[in-house]
Image: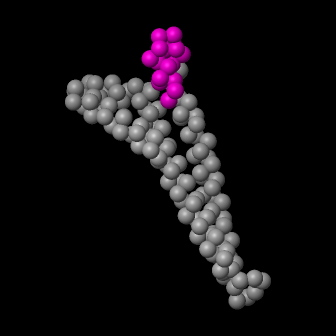
Amino acid sequence: CIMVTVMLISEGVEVRRRMSTGKSALYAYVRDFWNIVDWFNIVAGYILIVFFIRVVILAGNLKEEALLFEEPITEANQEQAQTFVDDMETLMMATLDLRRMGSVQPVSLMLRLFKAYSAQPRLAMVTATIGKGA
């Protein structure tokens, strides 16, 4: 959470600096592929945090519900059992969403490394090739 916020502040400062120099500088910033990668990384990071918090809350609610669950299942607690199964299904779908987003984040972080490579002349050829390919 802290690292994503640091990236947000860093990119926000860069946008503000570009806005103060004029529209053409801001336009050049927006057109730069690596800045788009940075903003995607920031958004993906916050989405991942939200998904994680959602899974933790759903798991806590399910734990409380399981402690209150009466066994064996009878006509009287059929609705309680169905609610438990529905909540378990919701937790599993939320976990799947978290895993999917978690698989996107490392790729975006790797792309962010290529931006750092562009500062070195020999490695800049690699990033320029990737940028032209995108």
Query: Residue 31 colored magenta?
Result: no
Q: Quadrant of residue 56?
A: bottom right
Residue 24, position as x, y percentages in the image: 26, 24
Residue 41, position as x, y percentages in the image: 48, 38
Q: Residue 79 or 102: which is nearer the viewer?
A: 102
In the drawing, does residue 106 fall left or right of residue 7?
Answer: right
Q: Quadrant of residue 31?
A: top left
In the drawing, does residue 32 fall left or right of residue 47?
Answer: left
Residue 97, position as x, y percentages in the image: 60, 52
Magenta region, main secondary structure: helix
Count of marks, rendered view: 0
Residue 99 versus residue 119 in the image, above or below: below
User: Among all residues in the image, which is located at the extreme front?
Assistant: 2
Residue 63 versus residue 48 in the image, above or below: below
Q: Residue 34 or 2: which is nearer the viewer?
A: 2
Residue 133 versus residue 96 in the image, above or below: above
User: Among all residues in the image, which is located at the extreme bottom?
Assistant: 76
Please indicate, yes or no, whether residue 43 appears anywhere in the rendered image: no
Say which residue appears at 54% left-offset and 54% top-offset: 51
Q: Quadrant of residue 42?
A: top left
Q: Which residues are magenta?
A: 112-128
Query: Residue 123 colored magenta?
Result: yes
User: Among all residues in the image, which is located at the extreme top?
Assistant: 122
Say which residue appears at 68% left-offset and 80% top-offset: 69
Residue 94, position as x, y percentages in the image: 60, 58
| Colour setup of the view | one colour
